[in-house]
Amino acid sequence: MPDGCSSVFQGCISVKMKNLEEELGQVLQENGLTMGTAESCTGGSIASLVTSISGSSSYFKGGIVSYAVSVKENLLGVPAETIEKYGVVSEETVAAMAYGAQEALDVDCVVATTGVAGPTGGTSENPVGTIWIGALYRNKLLTYRQEGDEGRGENVRRAVRNALMLLLQLVK
C-alpha cells in the first residue's frame, strides 16, 4: 500500500479527479441522500466546494466549522475524554465529529476533517500535513489518515478532495 494510505481505506485516494463534487452530488441526488460537513483544518472548504454546484441545496444541508475544541465538544458532542486521551488530531476525534455532525445536521452522510494543515503546529506524532478524514454514511464509517506536508494550501486541497472521494466511495 502506498505511503500515507490508511489500512481502513483500500488503496490511495486520487487527488487529481476532475468534477468529483459533481459526481458526488449526482449520486446523492439520485439516491435521495443528504449530506453535511464537520470541518476543522479545512475551514469550510469542503462545504464551499460542494455548494459550488448548482442544485446542491437539494442534498447539502449544512456544515460546522469546528476549529476550537469547545466547538467540537459543544456543537458536535465530541467527548472531552476522547480529546484528552487521543488528541484533537486522531481517528477517534474525527469519528466523533462525524457522528456528532450527522446528528446535529440530521443528514444521511457526513465528511469530517481534523488535522495540522501547517506550516506550524506539528508534533512528532502528528507532523504538519497529518489530517484525519472521516466519511460517515448512516452507520458506516471510513477513516483515512492523510500524511505528507506539501504546504498549507495544498494540504487543505488534498484533504478536501480526499474527503469527497472517501464519501463517494461510501455512498456508491
Image (tube, rainbow, N blue to C red):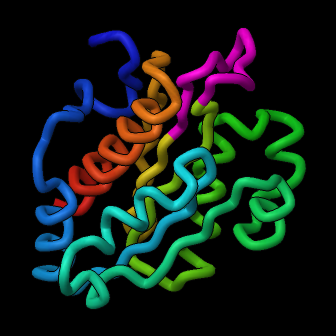
Q: Position of residue 130 (x, y in %)?
A: 56, 25
- In the rendered image, the vertical position of residue 167 relative to residue 130, given as above or below: below
**Image mark count:** 0
Quick one: 109 or 153, which is closer to the camera? 153
Q: Position of residue 26 (x, y in %)?
A: 12, 73
| Range drawn in magenta | 118-132
Q: Quadrant of the C terminus?
A: bottom left
Q: Is residue 126 a member of the stretch shown in magenta?
A: yes
Quick one: 138 or 118, which is closer to the camera? 118
Quick one: 95 or 73, which is closer to the camera? 73
Quick one: 118 or 114, which is closer to the camera? 118
Tell me the quarter of the picture where residue 4 sits: top left
Q: Residue at x 32, y 62 (%)?
A: 49
- In the rendered image, the vertical position of residue 119 relative to residue 19, given as above or below: above
Q: Position of residue 20 (x, y in %)?
A: 17, 54
Question: In this view, which residue lies farthest toward the bottom?
Answer: 58
Q: Quadrant of the N terminus?
A: top left
Q: Position of residue 82 (x, y in %)?
A: 80, 45
Q: Residue at x 79, y 64 (%)?
A: 71
Tell me the quarter of the picture where residue 124 sits: top right
* Prevalent SS, magenta region: loop
Q: Residue at x 75, y 60 (%)?
A: 72
Left or right position of 33 against 17: right
Q: Residue at x 31, y 88 (%)?
A: 57
Left or right position of 34 against 41: left
Q: Is residue 23 a member of the stretch shown in magenta?
A: no
